[in-house]
Amino acid sequence: MTKADAAHGAGITLEKLRFAYPGGSEMAFDLTISPSDIVAVMGPSGSGKSTLLSLIAGFETPTSGRIMIDGKDVSGLTPHRRPVSMVFQENNLFAHLTVAQNVGLGRSPALKLTEEDRAAVSDALARTGLAGKEDRLPRALSGGERQRVALARVLIRKRPVLLMDEPFASLGPALRDEMLDLIRALHAEQQMTVLMATHDPRDAERLCRTMIFVEEGQVAATGTTAAFIAGDASEAFNRYIGARREINYSTTN
Ligand SMILES: Nc1ncnc2c1ncn2[C@@H]1O[C@H](COP(=O)(O)OP(=O)(O)OP(=O)(O)O)[C@@H](O)[C@H]1O
């Protein structure tokens, strides 16, 4: 089996992870995620969802504590060396590289691609509905297409953990559904462990088995998405959702 075929999910454990931005209050995360779970990360604006994902990805460095992925301590590894892919709300692509090159980066950061790599890029583009757009630059794509290019790159990287920070926030409802279906299909195939920060409970309900609720720099509650949506998991979550309904979350994302 080649390295690229070795897709699987990885358990994630955050042990007494502490972190603060300069001048900010301390965040403290303790968390265990099962291999291959799909987890919604919800919580008020500024509660620490993006920071939590950035710590796991290695874009931020904790002041203390450990991050274990697949049983290994990755705390000292740079983002590139962690078994993780990350998709942001936007700006996932290099503007001066074509669609095919942006996807090819998932196999080789220097774009030294073998025939097998090129075939994998074509396959990933076909499966994300981007065949025929290989040579376009990102600016010649719609927002939904750009996110699909980012997912095509995830597909060929085959990392055991996929982190997504509000990946559909800039997309309309129909495109969101399409992207959720695509992620579900990728997960069925690769079984990667997924964490997705979102403000939209419908996204969580459609995709995620598990939910974690982040509040004031801590994981305040964890449970099944069904229990959260039924209102049985966390009073703080119920208040948050109630407040979001009042301000009509569909216009504020
Ligand atoms: N680079 C930074 N420097 C200083 N403070 C930061 C930085 N990034 C985030 N913060 C602060 O850290 C806290 C947590 O921010 P974070 O972006 O993790 O929240 P979030 O839950 O993802 O919010 P949102 O839902 O609005 O995206 C906030 O108070 C924010 O202002």
Image (cartoon, grey):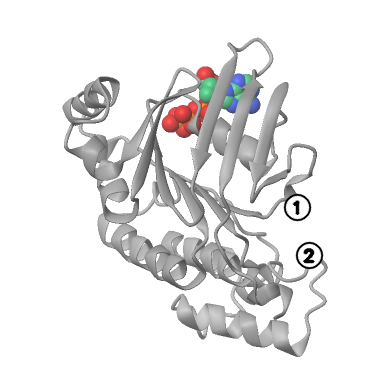
- For residue 132, side relative to residue 38 (left or right): right
Contact (Cβ within 8 Å) of mark 1 with mark 2 = yes
Question: Where residue 222 appears, x then y in whole percent?
Answer: 37, 33
Q: Earlier in the sequence, mark 1 or mark 2?
A: 1
Q: Quadrant of residue 135?
A: bottom right
Going 59% across and 80% down the picture, which residue do you hit?
Answer: 134
The response on whether ligand 1 sits within 8 Å of label 1 is: no
Q: Quadrant of the N terminus?
A: bottom right
Residue 227 seen in the figure: yes
Label 1 CA crowd tier, 10 Å (few <14, some 14–19, many 20+): few
Question: Where residue 107 appears, x then y in whole percent?
Answer: 72, 71
Q: Which residue is mark 1?
A: 80
Give me the disc on residue 109. 2
Q: Amino acid at mark 1?
A: His
Going 40% across and 51% down the picture, which residue do you hit?
Answer: 168
Name the foreground residue: 252 vs 35.
35
Label 2 CA crowd tier, 10 Å (few <14, some 14–19, many 20+): few
Q: SS class of the residue under badge 2?
A: loop
